[in-house]
Image: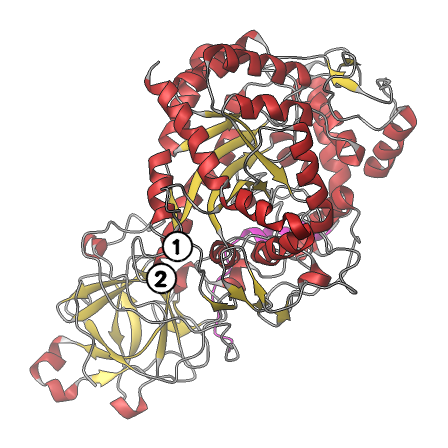
Amino acid sequence: MRPISIQHNYTQARHNPRSRRKLRKILALALSLPLLSMATVANAVATESEQDTDALSLMKADSAKPATVTSYNSMQLGAGLTESMPKATLTPYVSLDNRCFTMRINTPDAAKDPSSRKFVSTANIGYPTSAEEGQATPIAFEATTLGRYRLVDQQGRPLFASIFDEVWAGTNYGDRADWTITPEGDNFKIVATKTGQQLGTRFGKLAVGNADSYKNTTFSLIPASGCAQIPHGQINMISEPTEPTVNPDGTLNGIIDAHQHLLSVWGFGGHLFCGKPFHPGGIQEALAPCESHRIGAGTFFEMLLAGTKMYGNVDGWPTFTNRPTPTALLHQTGYYTGLERAWKAGVRALNVIYVGNRVICDIYPIKGTSCNEMEQVRAQAAQMQKLIDYVDAQNGGPGKGFLQIARTPADMRRIVASGKMAVSIGIEVSELFGCTGITSCSKEDIDKGLDELEKMGVSNVFPIHKFDNAFGGTRFDNGTTGTIMTFGNVVSNGTFFQVEKCEGDGPADLPLVMNNDKLLEVYKKVFGKDYDGVLPIYPSGKICNRKGLTELGEYLIRQLMDRGMVINVDHMSVKTIKRTLEITKEAGYPGVMSNHTWSDPLFYEEIIKQGGFYASYLSPTDKQVNDWRADHSVTPSLNHFGLGTDINGMGPLPVARKDAATNPLKYPITAPSGAVFDRNVTGERTWDFNKDGMSHYGLLADYLTDLLQQAGKDAPQMKKELMSSTEAYVRTWEGAVAYGNKH
């Protein structure tokens, strides 16, 4: 066959710094106790695995992807390449993903005698380069990002550049098994991405060397069959959507998930969560099991947050025994093919929110990144573009994937209308720009910080998150999480939360459901000893945070308005949100939203009247129908139904309905978009919403279908409001930008 051709974030009195450092050390030590000898394991988890020569059994495919062959000559080199990469690799070839080839080696000697050109084959060690075409080994090419690939032999083993410069068979993906491929006439040059060394032949086998050594060596890629099947995530769609992306009146037709943390694995120090939404080594690497989350720090933290079992079988790919589940808060639930399934079901826009927390990061014993919350945000911003590039690479090249970033409301309209999923960006940290309640923070810090966020493409901002800060007070968590955050506020701000009675029958912050006995009980459970400090006494019933919007907080709000950035009022104390909405109302500024039910419902009507946006956190479908009806009773102006899933945000996802066994969701299902789906399959696991609930993001399709069925006679109105939520979100964003353009 002919080679392919190129068509190219104590006491009630203020603590001093030494006390706060002591508390952090105590917290870290307490949470480290269950680890014991796990430090070694944790370090292994944090380090990229080296390749070895063990065999890997043939992998079974999750799905087959259509192969498209085009090229892209003008793109820049993908992120993460080393400085030693030769300049010749600045035009990588991007359309070899999911293709099967044999590799014919072209050397200067072979150029003199074309009949002497030989092929790559397989041996016990290494890859000979002297085979005839009939003995050539089929090699599977799988994109790791744009222009870079894994090369996988017929036994499912990745080719990697060993430290001896020979190419060997590995067991799993690592940075030495990543290859950058560039066109050279009708052939290709192949370079080891890690080292910048070019692929060639030495002593009759594949080897790598400096560019001069193999400058005239290229490879012809001959289409073949019999390659190892590379596993991928599935969406299990039977038929395509029938709902248009744009209505006849020009409005957008689609659902928005206005609050989700797709990239939070790169926050909190980088190791709090097990699993990633994507990985250059594919789904088997992205969703591999984590020892730290079976018998180490991760499982202890998860037990503390959600009450899950301390130890157990939590295998990841391919069996997914016991994880993920709706209540397993530290296991990845947003692998990118789950987004794709949700997109096909009618979720046509996402608001991905960069998140981090310095206190949690300081406490958690395993770290791979800085605990500074803004550094955590920067890490997620870098990964966002890498995700886009990865999805593009999996679909044939730049712009060919289903995900695109929307930096403006016009972008969101264009992307959704074109049939793709639009992604806006938000930020939700407790110490925004490093501004805690005890650090000095200036207007200049705010200006500089907002400049950076705008460059990142951030369009919506939470001024407050889990703790009080320099801008205002927080709305408390309740239960065990509230207790943990109360101690966290001491670390971040030097004091326990200060509370007072709320005004009359008006809005309230969430109750801190605990007295001294409860506080001491939780502290002893966490730290294994009695607390010997002075504790606050929190009353039962309706309470409000004493702290409201500060002078610096008012400056931040007005700067957000002048820049046309949407203000997220969730997590603000009653006093803080009241003053914020007074400012926006006086100014006629519509850019306000509550996007995951973390404000008192009595504020929703004011938000909508100002031109703002509201989205609901998810509950089991039968309860969610009641919540939807309740939202309308307190918010008569509400005309849309947006979602805020909060995936990977350490909050539970909806479990299955209690009556699902007798009143099940029947498969196949027809989603709001009109697309038809079977049960979702990942590796060896088949998911059933009636048993598994929304265990991962792909089951949002099943959730939405069941939700409409539970709505009964109200289903048509609910569907109309769901499908109008993206339009409502864009209009709020457009109003904010229009205001900013005038100021």
Q: Is residue 310 visible?
A: yes
Badges 2 and 1: C-beta atoms under 8 Å apart?
A: yes
- Looking at the image, residue 369 sits to the left or right of residue 116; the answer is right
Position of residue 263 measured from the top left corner of the image (x, y, whole percent): 51, 44
Name, please, the residue furthest toward the right.
517
- Looking at the image, residue 697 sits to the left or right of residue 526; the answer is left
Q: Is residue 372 visible?
A: no
Position of residue 201 measured from the top left corner of the image (x, y, whole percent): 25, 75
* Viewer-side label of 2, 1: 1
Position of residue 10 measured from the top left corner of the image (x, y, whole percent): 80, 18
* Residue under the image location 50 percent in, 46 percent down: 723
- Which residue position holds label 1? 402
Label 2 or label 1, whichever comes before in sequence order: 2
Instruction: Decide whether residue 179 is among the magenta residues.
Output: no
Q: Amino acid at mark 2?
A: Asn
Q: Amino acid at mark 1?
A: Phe
Name, please, the residue furthest toward the left.
112
**What span is colored magenta in the figure?**
37-55
Name, please, the residue furthest toward the bottom.
134
- Which residue position holds label 2? 395
- Looking at the image, residue 217 sits to the left or right of residue 353; the answer is left
Name, please, the residue furthest toward the top.
551
* Residue under the image location 29 percent in, 47 percent down: 83
Q: Residues within 10 Å of mark 1 (few under 14, many from 20)?
A: many
* Residue under the image location 44 percent in, 46 percent down: 253
Camera-side residue of 172 and 272: 272
Camera-side residue of 319 and 128: 319
Up-down relation of residue 704 to residue 282 (above or below): above
- Looking at the image, residue 589 sits to the left or right of residue 521; the answer is left
